[in-house]
Image (cartoon, grey):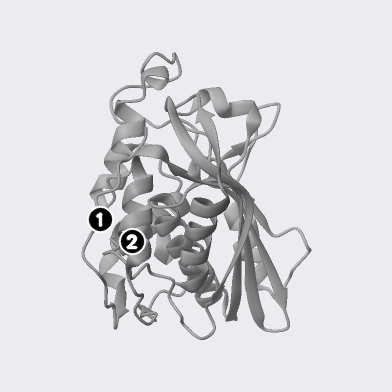
Amino acid sequence: MKQYLDLCQRIVDEGVWVENERTGKRCLTVINADLEYNVAANEFPLVTTRKSYWKAAIAELLGYLRGYDNAAQFRAIGCNTWNANANENAAWLANPYRKGEDDMGRVYGVQGRQWRNSVGEEFDQLRKIYDDLRNGIDDRGEILTFYNPGEFHMGCLRPCMHTHTFSLVGDTLYLTSSQRSCDVPLGQNFNQIQVFTLLALMAQITGHKAGKAYHKIVNAHIYEDQLALMRDVQLKREPFPAPKLRINPKIKTLEDIETWVTLDDFEVEGYQYHEAIAYPFSV
């Protein structure tokens, strides 16, 4: 929590106002933030200075790992975060590549599981990483990226958290996750949960110990309509100790994640939190 709150305070103190064309709002912005999560010690980075809905964040991660491309698929596993971008984004609604209601297009997990090259051949990035790590291989290119500039026009949103690099040192697995843009009051709450959980899951299904997860954010910002709530409410609260994440030990393979895993296979222990804060969401 300290590093999260330090980043929030840094944006309040040092941020520069930047106009955001997509949302039509101003953002108080800083460039470059680095965070670390100790997955080995199971220090789950769940925000405690407001209630955090961690289940939706893990459900979204599961959808990415399965290659989902439809908001209805995400709703079915407990995540509503794609409803607005799939159905209320004016540019996407007018896009000829949109297939209809709830369609998200070729975003996030679609790129991770069905990356297309220039001649239309598909490649499953996650499967390659999984197979390598299960065999104790780290070719220094165990990289899962959702960032495909050639297909930005075919999806409702460019990826914010765009690249995950796995590193195997001995029998310990590490993760470095890169993010181009972060809505810190809302998005980072999800993102840091997902970085932590992704490393914990991948270590478990590839048979390794989890080490640390490193989270790099390029553009960290607070929207103008979020600022007062962050400055005058959330930053005034004292954080509680970090809770722990329990993952069903029966999850042993990538196929398990693809087929039967649900939110019931995840449990958070010792979560103390302050009351919720209703931050505005920008589409």
Q: With 82 as the anchor, is 142 left or right in this view? A: right
Residue 277: mark: 1
Cα distance in 3D space between marks 1 and 2: 8 Å
Q: Position of residue 106 (x, y in %)?
A: 50, 33
Number of residue marks: 2
Dot 1: few (<14), some (14–19), or many (≥20) neighbours within 10 Å?
some
Residue situated in front as seen by the camera: 196 or 135: 196
Residue situated in front as seen by the camera: 211 or 171: 211
Residue situated in front as seen by the camera: 240 or 229: 229
The quadrant in which residue 247 appears is: bottom left
248 relative to 12, above or below: below
- Residue type at mark 1? Ile
Picture residue at 30% right of the left edge, 59% below the top: 233
Residue 112 visible (yes or no): yes
In what quadrant of the picture does the C terminus appear? top left
Q: Earlier in the sequence, mark 1 or mark 2?
A: 2
177 relative to 68, above or below: below
Picture residue at 27% right of the left edge, 39% below the top: 72
Q: With 207 as the anchor, is 96 left or right in this view? A: left
- Point out the residue furthest to the left here: 275
Q: Position of residue 118 (x, y in %)?
A: 71, 27
Picture residue at 54% right of the left edge, 33% below the top: 18
Q: Position of residue 61 (x, y in %)?
A: 42, 56
Residue 234: mark: 2
Residue situated in front as seen by the camera: 30 or 126: 30
Picture residue at 64% right of the left edge, 60% below the top: 129
122 relative to 199, above or below: above
Residue 262 visible (yes or no): no
Q: Position of residue 220 (x, y in %)?
A: 54, 48
- Residue type at mark 2? Gln
